[in-house]
Structure formats: structure tokens, C-alpha cells
Amino acid sequence: MSVQTAILEIPGIRFETLKALDAKAQKFGKTVEEYTRDLIEQDVSSNEMTFDEILAPIRAEVEASGITDEELDELFMQARRDYYLEQKGRD
């Protein structure tokens, strides 16, 4: 079974926006067209995102950053400690 597709032109997009879109697409290893198509399809296909969909951009950025699992664990632990101290100070 074949899926019907179409071409969409969007006039008036600023060059800076296209550059930013291209940079985001590259982070995910996609072309601008692939990345934009995925964004549109995700947006119209469901109002509710799965947990995996919510975490996908975070996972991609963590992977692209080169941070180790240990460094990421420590980053989260420090954030938890900071939050705890902040909440304790409000009492």
C-alpha cells in the first residue's frame, strides 16, 4: 500500500530561522526536510507525546555533548542537592 505525499512551500521564513533549523536537524543526523517533516507529523498526529518522544531531544543533546554517564549522574545529583538546599532554606 502506498502513502500519498505532497510538497509544502512556506514563504517568508527568515534565513536565520532556516539556519537554526538546519543546526537542529544536524544534531539529530537529519536533513532540514526530514527534521521539519518529523516535527509537523508529530504535532498533528497526537496531542500527547510518549515519554520516549519527550526525552528524544534530551537524549540526542546528551549524546552529542560527549558527557559520560558518570558526569551526567553527578550533574543530576548536584541539581537535586541544590534543589534540596533551596527548599530547606524556604522553611
Image: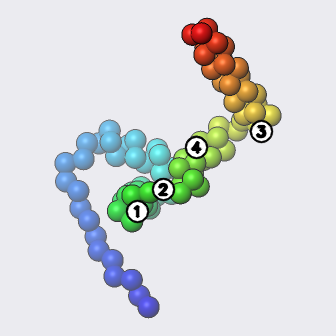
Across and down, in percent, residue 26 comes to 51, 49
Across and down, in percent, residue 20 comes to 40, 41
Which residue is disc 1 drawn over?
46
Residue that lies at the very extreme toward the right in this rendered image: 70
Q: Which mark is drawn over residue 69?
A: 3
Which residue is disc 4 drawn over?
58
Q: Tell me how far mark 3 sits from mark 1, CA to CA.
A: 32 Å
Residue that lies at the very extreme toward the left in this rendered image: 12
**Residues at circles 1 and 2 in contact by the CB criterion of under 8 Å:** yes
Query: From this viewpoint, is residue 41 visible?
Result: no
The picture quadrant where one finds residue 33 is: bottom left
Quarter of the picture holding the C terminus = top right
Q: Nearer the viewer, residue 50 or 41?
A: 50
Q: Tell me how far mark 4 sits from mark 2, CA to CA.
A: 14 Å
Q: Tell me how far mark 4 sits from mark 1, CA to CA.
A: 20 Å
**Residues at circles 3 and 4 in contact by the CB criterion of under 8 Å:** no
